[in-house]
Amino acid sequence: MESKTFEDLIETNKMYQLVTERLEVVDPDAQNLYARFNMEAELMELILDFYNQEDDHIASQKLHKFSPEQVLAYLQASHKLYLSKKLPEIEQTMVHIFNKYGQTHALLTTLTVFFNDYKNRLIEHIRSEEKDFFPFIKKLIAAEKGELTTEQTMDLMKSSSLEDYTDNHGPIEDDLKNVSVIIQDYSKNQETPLPYRVFLNQVEIFEMELRKHAIIEDHVLVPMARELEKILRERLNPAV
Ligand SMILES: [Fe+2]
Ligand SMILES: [Fe+2]
């Protein structure tokens, strides 16, 4: 019983670190990170809860009480964390294994090729969200606050950004499962070497992180964008 509590604590700390470390990535020198990035402790608590919850959809419901700006700030900080910390860390482990086992383990070539390809696809996924979808949400927020002209708002409503996004937002984290498959296939009849297990562990945590991230995008941010569109449509055309 006691050891379970201890393990729970470790697990919670690990999750807490996962949730809070993106604040450091955004600005390691900031005095008051929560205020600066508009992420109150309450939002971080809920996201932490979300990371620990089995039922993603119930947990994501609770995030709806935050503003689209807050959710967006969190997702953007996450993107930064993936690009500047998570991917380089995983790559570093990869290089370490390669230096140690590269000569003897043919599997490494497959893994390296797979991971490089995956990394490029993930960077492209993030880049397209940062370039198209997130700016669109920012414009919706500005329009809702009355910061755009009627004409600008009408143009914005004509864009198909939301549909384009929901039609094309694929589950990029699913591909990471292949890393486990590749490693497990390889070690079928033998003990998996420790560096592979470390690598696998990093990849699995990252996979979970990306899955939660995508749920926040699809089930929190997208409904918020729909709501903003609805408000703006009613404002532009109150009779309908
Ligand atoms: Fe994203
Ligand atoms: Fe995404």
Image: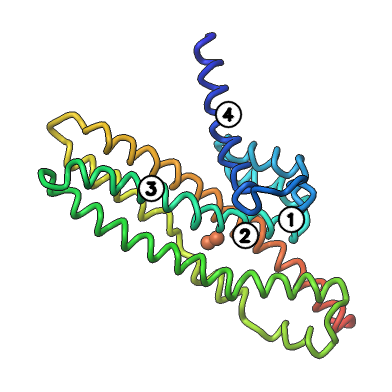
Query: Where is residue 11 drawn, in percent x and y?
Result: 53, 28
The residue shown at (58%, 44%) is 56
Amino acid type at image mark 1: Gln
Left or right: where does residue 147 sit relative to residue 48? right
3 or 2: tag closer to the N-terminus? 2
Local crowd at mark 3 within 10 Å, few (<14), some, or many (≥20)? some
Q: Which residue is mark 3?
A: 90
Mark 1–mark 4 CB contact (< 8 Å):
no
Q: CA distance from mark 3 to mark 2?
A: 20 Å
Local crowd at mark 1 within 10 Å, few (<14), some, or many (≥20)? some
Q: Which residue is mark 1?
A: 70
Amino acid type at image mark 2: Gln
Residue 238 vertical placement versus 46 (above, below): below
Residue 91 vertical placement versus 160 (above, below): above
2 or 1: tag closer to the N-terminus? 1
Q: CA distance from mark 4 to mark 3?
A: 22 Å
Q: Which residue is mark 2?
A: 76
Looking at the image, the residue that sits furthest to the top is: 2
Amino acid type at image mark 3: Ile
Residue 205 in which image quadrant: top left
Query: Where is residue 171 drawn, in percent x and y?
Result: 45, 59
Check disc 4 and report its element: helix, strand or loop.
helix
Circle 3 or circle 2, nearest the eye: 3
Circle 1 or circle 3, nearest the eye: 3
- Residue 12: mark in rendering: 4
4 or 3: tag closer to the N-terminus? 4
Query: Where is residue 225 drawn, in percent x and y?
Result: 70, 67
Q: CA distance from mark 1 to mark 4?
A: 23 Å
